[in-house]
Image (cartoon, coloured by chain):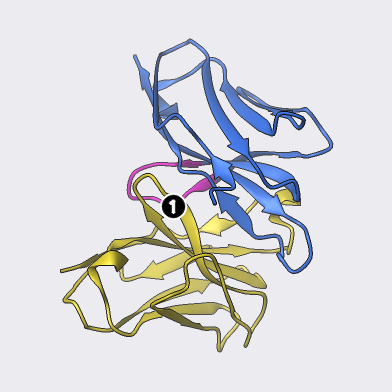
């Protein structure tokens, strides 16, 4: 049981390049999330999805797009990367709409992205 | 607006002593609070949670206390072990309206437990 798998684990991009981060979960979870972690800022929500075919903006959505064409996959795209998007990106999934009552989110191991 | 704040970036304790990590929040719509633990190069993992209608929840060496009137919660680790050295995040779950149970995280506190 792999849980939540993120690919790639590391990536260096040049300013203006595009890329897609892939998140795959094998737990049949309905809810999926993309967070970024920055020093002193904690984890901030970028986009999230409450089911296949649905997406919504989180706290810091600018510069990112997402798609959830299949229930198990949640893709995060950077159309034109900027140095401010240098961060560690975490994907998470949840069985319930109220993760506090369960065991919270299940996180992937992260993607470390550097934009130069 | 930082809805969840962990004002101590780091904490250092001796093995066997108590570790107390603090968290403050401003959103009155939070109905659950969670603590996550994160090791380097890994994703955060769930540690313990507490409902807003309770003031204490205990799980082995970990206890979370909630003071709703002060909008403050704390995580106690007793006794602390070197393997507890990690970054600890607190998070609030917003059950209101269209929040879809989203979690809002604090900045994290780096705990170092010295042998």
Q: Position of residue A92 (x, y in %)?
A: 53, 62
Which chain hosts label 1?
Answer: B
Specify the quadrant of the image occupied by residue B23: top right
The prevailing secondary structure element of the residues shown in magenta is: loop
Label 1, on which residue? B43
Please name whichever residue, A59 or A93, is drawn nearer the observer in this view of the structure: A59
- What span is colored magenta in the figure? B37-45
Quadrant location of the C terminus of chain B? top left
In the rendered image of this protein, which colour is used for chain B? blue
Give residue B96's position: percent from left, percent from top. Answer: 78, 59
- Residue displayed at 68% across by 52% down: B93
Q: Residues within 10 Å of mark 1 (few under 14, many from 20)?
A: many
Is B53 positioned to the left or the right of A72 in the image? right
Looking at the image, residue A88 lies above or below residue B15 = below
Residue A9 visible in the displayed image: no
Q: What residue occupies the far right of the structure in this picture?
A: B53
Q: How many marks?
A: 1
User: At x 64% / y 70%, what residue is drawn?
Assistant: A31
Q: Inspect the magenta stretch and tell me whether residue A49 lies in it.
A: no
Residue drawn 77% across and 30% down?
B69
Q: Colour of chain A?
A: yellow
Q: Secondary structure at mark 1?
A: loop
């Amino acid at each position: 049981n792999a849980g939540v798998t993120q690919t790639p684990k590391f990536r260096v991009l040049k300013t203006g390049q595009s890329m897609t981060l892939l998140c795959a979960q094998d737990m049949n979870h309905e809810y999926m999330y993309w967070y970024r972690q920055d020093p002193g800022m904690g984890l901030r929500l970028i986009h999230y999805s409450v089911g296949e075919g649905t997406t919504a903006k989180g706290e810091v959505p600018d510069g990112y797009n997402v798609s959830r064409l299949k229930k198990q996959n949640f893709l995060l795209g950077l159309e034109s990367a900027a140095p401010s998007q240098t961060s560690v990106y975490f994907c998470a999934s949840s069985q319930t709409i109220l993760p506090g009552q369960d065991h919270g989110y299940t996180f992937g191991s992260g993607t470390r992205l550097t934009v130069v | 607006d930082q809805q969840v704040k962990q004002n101590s970036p780091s904490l250092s304790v001796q093995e066997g002593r108590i570790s107390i990590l603090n968290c403050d929040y401003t959103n009155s719509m939070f109905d659950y609070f969670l603590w996550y633990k994160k090791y380097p190069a890994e994703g955060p993992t769930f540690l313990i949670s507490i409902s807003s209608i309770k003031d204490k929840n205990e799980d082995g060496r970990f206890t979370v206390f909630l003071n709703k009137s002060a909008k403050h919660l704390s995580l106690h680790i007793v006794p602390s072990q070197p393997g507890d050295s990690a970054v600890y995040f607190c998070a609030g779950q917003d059950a209101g309206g269209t929040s879809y149970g989203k979690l809002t995280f604090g900045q994290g506190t780096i705990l170092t437990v010295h042998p």
